Image (spheres, rainbow, N blue to C red):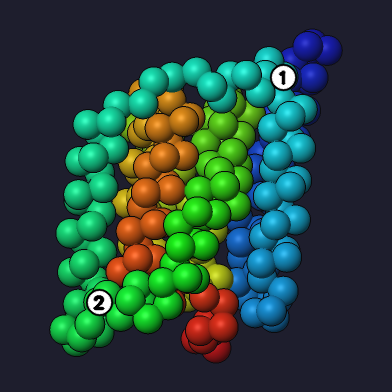
Amino acid sequence: MTLADTSTEGRRLRLWVEFLGLFVAVPLLIAVVLPPGTMFPALFAATAVGVILLHRTEGFQWSDLLQGTIDWRVVAGFAAITFVCALAVSYATTQGGDVLAFARERWPLLLLILVFYPILSALPQELVFRPLFFRRYGAILPDGTAAIVLNAVLFSFAHLMYWSVIVAGMTFFGGIAFAWAYARRGSFPMAVILHAVAGQIVFALGLGMFFYSGNVTRPF
């Protein structure tokens, strides 16, 4: 084995350690070990580490994130599908109750969510799960559709802390769309917008309760 081979293997090993630590160990630790009140601080800390790693990724420039166009037809279609699915889930979980109760009764809070969710939630998550995932760890991951599916699986796994089948399903299928926008369409802006739109619809229809740490009940 040459010195170059040794260096390459060492780099791959380092990437695997980072990858498994950030995308597997940290979500598992947050979901299983940490008290519910510390979930979000730990998640923010992990996100900050991810952003630092992205900044240090060879060949990455922050200006790269501005590349790619936004297909508003795709955004509109995705929003329509998300609305129908979220509406169905809302009706099912409220036994046909008032799905607009949150929007009507707590509209000031909803307005804040609609304004700040894209910046404080969707954008940081997309930085870690799309550019960092595909740019920094692409060399150790499968190609094509397999990488997109793996990305969605790990994006869903990152929400294990909520211990909700509904959250797992929503984040998996959302993750497929967000990863597709970034990896296939080459558009980080569209990935962020799709994520933002999905979150806004989910909260507007009262499904934000599934993403509230105060409602978390661990099955053990």
Please give the label number shown on residue 99. 2
Name the quadrant containing residue 148.
Answer: top left
Q: Which residue is mark 1?
A: 58
Residue 153: x and y in percent read: 43, 51
Q: Where the C terminus falls, by quadrant?
A: bottom right
Residue 50: x and y in percent read: 69, 43
Left or right position of 112 against 136? left
* CA distance for labels 1 and 2: 47 Å
Name the quadrant containing residue 65.
Answer: top right
Looking at the image, is 127 positioned above or below residue 197?
Answer: above
* Image point (60%, 42%), residue name: 128
**Badge 2 local density, few (<14 within 10 Å), some, or many (20+)?**
many
Residue 105: x and y in percent read: 37, 81
Q: Determine the secondary structure under disc 1.
A: loop
Looking at the image, is 107 positioned above or below residue 142?
Answer: below
Front in this rendered view, residue 137 or 113: 113
Left or right position of 36 against 150? right
Label count reads 2
- Badge 1 amino acid: Glu
**Cβ atoms under marks 1 and 2 closer than 8 Å:** no
Residue 122 in view in this figure? no
Q: Determine the secondary structure under disc 2.
A: loop
